[in-house]
Image (cartoon, grey):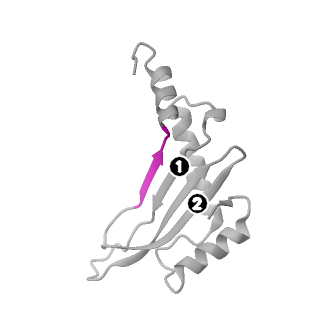
Amino acid sequence: MRINLTQTQKISDTLRTVAADARRYMILDADELGYYAMKAEEIAASLKLKRSELKGLKVSVLSASSSSSAARKTACSSLVLERGAAGWFLVSCEKKYREPKKSELFEVIATEEQKEASVSRCFPRYRM
């Protein structure tokens, strides 16, 4: 799967299909994915990555589970976004089950080239 984030209707349909009848802790709105992409770009900027170097950057999101002390696991969204040359793409969307009282997980995954570029700019005297 590789859906451009500008195709909001297609993404919303995909998110609803994956969620099936689970709704409460699932990400169902395509606009919410734009928030994660924006947050990842802010993190990349703080790492001194140029906009032209963002291709291949990935974002992994696992939505929060129920806050109650329920005895059973909660259905949550597990998403992966990837930065392409022209924008962000949804590349993976799954329903996962998590224990109660788990917070949202947000992780930015950089390529080796991006890591090296960031280290060389943030720590110019450090050699890898």
Q: Residue 31 in the image: state x and y as whole percent.
A: 65, 62
Report if residue 15 lies within the magenta region: no
Highlighted range, magenta:
104-111
Q: What amino acid type should be assigned to the residue bearing mark 2? A: Val
Judged by its main secondary structure, the magenta piece is strand
Within 10 Å of the Cα at label 1, are there few (<14), some (14-19), or many (20+) other Cα atoms?
many
Structural distance between the alpha carbons of marks 1 and 2? 9 Å
Q: Residue 4 in the image: state x and y as whole percent.
A: 69, 58
Q: What amino acid type should be assigned to the residue bearing mark 1? A: Lys
Q: Residue 65 in the image: state x and y as whole percent.
A: 38, 71
Give whichever of discs 1 and 2 has the lower sequence position.
Answer: 1
Residue at 30%, 73% in the rendered image: 99
**Circle on res. 91:** 2
Residue at 55%, 77% in the rendered image: 18
**At numbered mark 2, what does the secondary structure look like: helix, strand or loop?**
strand
Specify the quadrant of the image occupied by residue 53. top right
**At numbered mark 1, what does the secondary structure look like: helix, strand or loop?**
strand
Q: Residue 52 in the image: state x and y as whole percent.
A: 66, 33
Within 10 Å of the Cα at label 2, are there few (<14), some (14-19), or many (20+) other Cα atoms?
some
Determine whether label 1 and label 2 are within 8 Å by CB.
yes
The residue labelled by disc 1 is: 58
Report if residue 106 lies within the magenta region: yes
* Left or right: 32 in relation to 105: right
